[in-house]
Amino acid sequence: MARYGSIFLLMALGGPAAAAENMKFSGTLIEPPPCTINDGGEVDVDFGNRVGITKVDGVNYLQPVNYRVTCGPGAGAWSMTLAVVGTPADYDEAAIESNVDDLAVRLLQNGKRFPLNQPIPIKLNAPPTLEAVPIKRPGAALKEGRLKPRPPCWRCTNEVVCDG
């Protein structure tokens, strides 16, 4: 008899679950206002004409990255992120490859390494301070040449965040 009770219990548990009532959701989808960086132009950093190849050490030639985030009306109510999308140097995830062998440009956010391809939350009215500095592959001897970092793509996006 216990055997039939076990089979009956398995049949009862394996049966279809009770159907839930239909659920209704309502609301309005709002498109976030568009944002641009430097009005869609390039973000340029000038290290000058006299960067000494023996003085590139990740400290010398540090320059501010001047950029401006502009968004449409109402953007302040949205969560914002900023990312620099590009190919990192294989020896530093926060450095953009350049056209010169063993030379890259490291980005810093508020004094700390700013890894490429990783969005960070920002406040539109107080964007982070960004800086750039040339670096070389550890142990490398640089050759003279004109530095041109491979252009990254700067993205500022609005996010819809749902907590609950």
Image (spheres, rainbow, N blue to C red):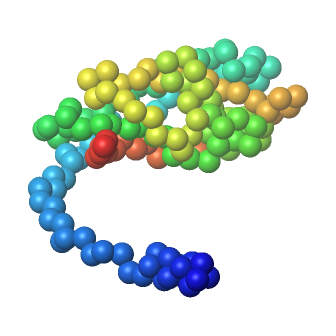
State how many labels appear: 0
Can you give x and y, in whole percent of width and height, for residue 10 in the image? Answer: 52, 78
Write down the quadrant of residue 120 in the picture: top left
Q: In which quarter of the image is the N terminus?
A: bottom right
Q: Position of residue 107 (x, y in %)?
A: 57, 29
Q: Is residue 59 above or below residue 147?
A: above
- Whether residue 55 is visible: yes
Asked which quadrant contains residue 99, the reply is: top right
Is 36 on the left-hand or right-hand side of 81?
Answer: left
- For residue 78, side relative to residue 129 (left or right): left
Residue located 18% across and 71% down the image:
22
Q: Where is residue 149 in the image (x, y as percent from the top left)?
A: 60, 40
Q: Quadrant of residue 138?
A: top right
Note whether 67 is above or below 14 in the view shown.
Answer: above
Give the farthest residue toward the front: 1
- Look at the image and tell me whether residue 147 can be seen: no
User: Measuring 54% from the left and 79% from the top, which residue is drawn there?
Assistant: 5
Is residue 25 placed above or below 112 in the rendered structure? below
Front in this rendered view, residue 80 or 40: 80
Q: Nearer the viewer, residue 135 or 123?
A: 123
The percent position of residue 121, horizontal first and vertical second, equals 40, 33
